[in-house]
Amino acid sequence: MPRYRYIAMAADGKKVKGAIAAESSYAARKQLRERSIHPTNVTEVSAGDKKKAALFSIFSRSSRGQIVDIIKQMATLLNSGIKLTEALSVLTLQVSDPRLKSALIDIRDRVVTGESFTDALKDYGDYFDVIYVSMVRVGEVTGTLGESFATVAGFMEKRQRVESKVKTAMVYPCILILFCIAAILILTTKVIPKIAGQIERTGQKLPWITERLMDVSKVLTTWRLGIVIAVVVGIVLALRWFLKTERGAYLRDKLLLSLPLFGPLIKQRVVSRFASTLSTLLGSGLAMAESLRVVAEVTGNILMRRAVQQSRERILAGADIATPLRDSGVIDPAIAHMVAVGEKSGELEMMLKNISDNLEASTDTVIERLSATVEPLIIVIMAVIIGVIAYATILPILEVSAGQF
C-alpha cells in the first residue's frame, strides 16, 4: 500500500506532520479528516524516499534498546491504569529520535480517532515487528494490553541479551583481522616497493617471492585496483541477488549450519529463537496455528522456516508438530523429542521455555569455546602471513649482502 507524507492542522490549531498508508491521496486525506486533522499538504513517498527509509532502517535497528525502553515504559503506564492514548502522549515527549517520535504521534492520533492500535502499528514494521504486533493484538482483544507489553519487553530483552553476547565475542577477532589487513597493506604498498626499487637499481634479481609481492603491490597502488574493486563489487552484488532467491537462501543457511566452528552456535541461536518466540506467543494467548505462522516469519533460517511451516500444516490437519522439526536437521532429536512430550502432555509452552533457557545458558559455553579456538587461530594466520611478507622483504637484502662478500 502506498505511503503519503502529510502536513496538517490538528483540532487544537497546532501544525502536525507525519506519514500515513492509504490507497490514494484522496483516501489519505479522508483518513486524516476522520481523525479531526485537516491536511494542507499530502504527497506520496517516492521510490527514492523509500530507499532512504530502507537505508535508515538499517541504522534504526541499532536503537533497539530504545524500543525496548519504550515498551517497558508502556507496560508500566498501562498497568498503572493510564489510558493508552495518554501513555502514547507521554512517550512521545521522551523519544529523541525524530522518525520514531513521528511514528508514535501518528499511532496515537490514529488510536484517538478509534482505529485499532494493532492496525496502526502494522505501518511501522521497522520499529515494531510481527511478533510485537501479534502479541499486542491478543492483548487488545483480551483487555490485557499492559501484560502483553510486559511480556514483549521481557522477550525482547532476552533476545537482545543473547545477540549482544555473540557480538561481544566477535569484537576481538574482528580487531585482530583489521590489524592484520592494515599491516599487510602497509608492508605491501610502502615497505616492499622501496626495498625492491633500491635492489633493482643495483642490478640484482629479486627472489620469486618478492616479485610476487611486488605484483600484489602494483595491483594495490595502480589503476588495476579499480578493476579489482569493480570485480569484487560485481561479485558481491551478484551474490546478494542470489541470496535473496529461495535457492540462494537455502544454500546459505545450510552452509552456515554446517560450518565447523560457528555452525553449532548458529544452530543454537536458531533453535533458541524458535523456542522462546513460540513459548512467548503461546503464553500470550495466541492460537497455535497463528503462533507458528508468526514464528515462521521471524525464525531467520529458511530450513527452520520450512520446518515450522510444515508443522503448522500438520497442526491444521490434526497431526503433531514434532515430526517436521525432527526432520529439518536443525533441531536435535533430543529437543524434538522434548517438544513431542510437551505437546502430548499439554505443557508445550513450559517445555519450550525450558528448552530456550537451557540453550541460552549453554550459549555462553559455546561462545567461550569459540573464542578460545578462533582467537589463537587468527593470531597464527596473522603470524604466518606477516612472516611470509617479512621473509620476502629480508631475503633480497640478505642476497645483496651475501653478494658483496
Image (cartoon, rainbow, N blue to C red):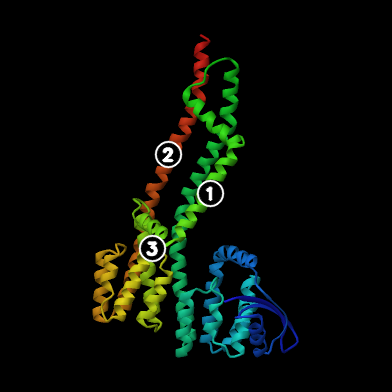
Q: Residue 119: percent from the left, percent from the top?
A: 53, 83
Q: Secondary structure at mark 1?
A: helix
Mark 3 is surrounded, within 10 Å at the Cα level, by few (under 14), some (14 to 19) or many (20 or more) other residues, namely many
The label number, if any, that marks residue 289 in the structure image: none
- Which residue occupies 28% across, 70% down? 324
In terms of image quadrants, where is residue 368?
A: bottom left
Between 215 and 368, the one lying in front of the other is 215
Q: Secondary structure at mark 2?
A: helix
Residue flagged by tag 2: what amino acid is it? Answer: Ile
Residue tagged by mark 3?
269
Residue tagged by mark 2?
381
Between 296 and 162, the one lying in front of the other is 296
Q: Nearer the viewer, mark 3 or mark 1?
A: 1
Real-space CA distance between mark 1 and mark 2, rounded to the nearest whole angstrom? 28 Å
Q: Earlier in the sequence, mark 3 or mark 1?
A: 1
Real-space CA distance between mark 3 and mark 1, rounded to the nearest whole angstrom? 31 Å
Q: Residue 317: percent from the left, percent from the top?
A: 28, 80
Residue flagged by tag 1: what amino acid is it? Answer: Gly
Q: Earlier in the sequence, mark 1 or mark 2?
A: 1
The label number, if any, that marks residue 234 in the structure image: 1
Between 317 and 73, the one lying in front of the other is 317
Residue flagged by tag 3: what amino acid is it? Answer: Arg
Image quadrant where one finds the N terminus: bottom right
Q: Residue 397: percent from the left, percent from the top?
A: 53, 20
The vertical placement of 196 against 346, above or below, is: above
User: Does the CB distance between marks 3 and 1 fall below 8 Å?
Assistant: no
User: Does the CB distance between marks 3 and 2 fall below 8 Å?
Assistant: no
Q: Is residue 96 visible?
A: no
The vertical placement of 35 against 217, above or below, is: below
